[in-house]
Amino acid sequence: MTDLIPAEALSALVARLFAAAGAPADAAATVAEALVDADLRGLPSHGSHLVPVYVERLRQGSVSTRTDLKVLVDAGGIAVLDAGHALGVLTADQAMSLATAKAREYGIGAVAVRHAFHFGAAGRYARAAAREGFIGIAAANTRPMMPAPGGGHPVVGNNPIAIGVPGPAARPDAGADQQDPDEPLVLDIALSAVNIGRIRIAAGNGHGIPDGWATDAEGRPTTDPAAALAGMLLPAAGHKGFGLALMVDVLAGVLAGGGYGEQVNGLYADTAVPNECGHFFLALDVAAFGDVDGFASRLADLEASVTAPPYAPGVDRVLLPGQRSAQRLREAARQGIRVDQGVLARLRALAADLDVPLPEGLPR
């Protein structure tokens, strides 16, 4: 069951909760905007569902209230940053901004971040780069959740990666009311069959999960979300998803000089212990590779070929990566966000605990 909530009301509540937990007001507003944007885009596993654990970590001190990163390496198009366990949205925004600034100067900008915290949806940062005219890549490592092919214990996280590409102002398959000149082509995926947030939501609501998502602690396939949370996620596309996840761990962890493998702690584990994940950001200046108009024309041609008929039986439209997210964003901005009642109950309980007043528009 869900409730329809105005985005402004939900964002105001989340910002108030973070501020009450000690985050500076502007930082609280930024993180709230990022999480509610995920809700708007139909990604509840990366949205306000995360607020209670973020707040608990702020209160426990494993997430810092600092807002700036420490620069450890600054060499041409490369930087290494220490996030100091600050809120991941804040440090990731800054890291991608630095990557694009370097790309503007050098054609390419690569930024690795150590001692980081969960940054929400990776697509936020790839999309931000793409809106500035860059191809953007954002990746992060997580605690081990997936086994190696043939392995019986988790050795690598489901390590999300997102790629954003500056897109044409008009998509060939969208009506005039569906155009968004600022919406780029964005792929945003975790490298498991499903992200663990969806399993947590299923567990919280007492629902089962599909076969093929996860195993129990003994490595047996399961449709019980509680058993899955105690077990392992299965990689997307078998050894291919596992291999990509391992390489993200190299970029976001090993290369960054921070946590990797078992050194990364679970988001929902001991909330007094830092997450210790790592992030990696890459920006490529399209203009540095040649004619920008030519790039846009070639991209439009490629997109048109991907979305052109014929279609499979029963299908009347093919979507590009990021289009469904953009459609949901537009719809939710008009109609409100469908928020799971369990999530909303936890936010209300947290507001009562922190003595935070509920904003107008939020069900009591």
Image (cartoon, rainbow, N blue to C red):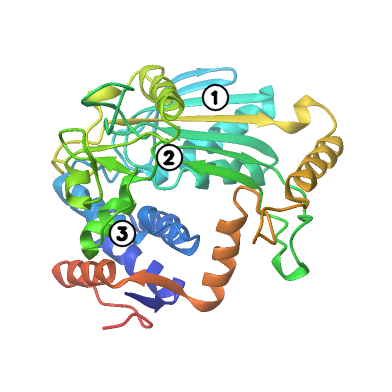
The Cα–Cα distance between marks 2 and 1, rounded to whole angstroms, is 21 Å
How many numbered marks have been drawn onto this rendered protein structure? 3
Would you identify the image quadrant in which residue 261 lies? Answer: top left
Image quarter in which the C terminus is found = bottom left
Would residue 88 appear left or right of 224 to someone viewing this image?
right
Q: Which residue is drawn at 41% across and 78% down?
A: 4
Q: Residue at x 52, y 71 (%)?
A: 332
Would you name the residue on which mark 2 appears? 190
Labels 2 & 1 near each other (Cβ < 8 A): no
Q: Position of residue 142 (x, y in %)?
A: 32, 34
The Cα–Cα distance between marks 2 and 3, rounded to whole angstroms, is 17 Å
Q: Residue at x 62, y 55 (%)?
A: 323
Dot 2 crowding, Cα within 10 Å, few <14, some 14–19, many 20+? many
Dot 3 crowding, Cα within 10 Å, few <14, some 14–19, many 20+? many
Would residue 70 appear left or right of 230 to someone viewing this image?
right
Q: Position of residue 363 (x, y in %)?
A: 31, 82
Would you name the residue on which mark 1 appears? 110
Q: Is mark 3 on a helix, strand or loop?
A: helix
Would you name the residue on which mark 3 appears? 49
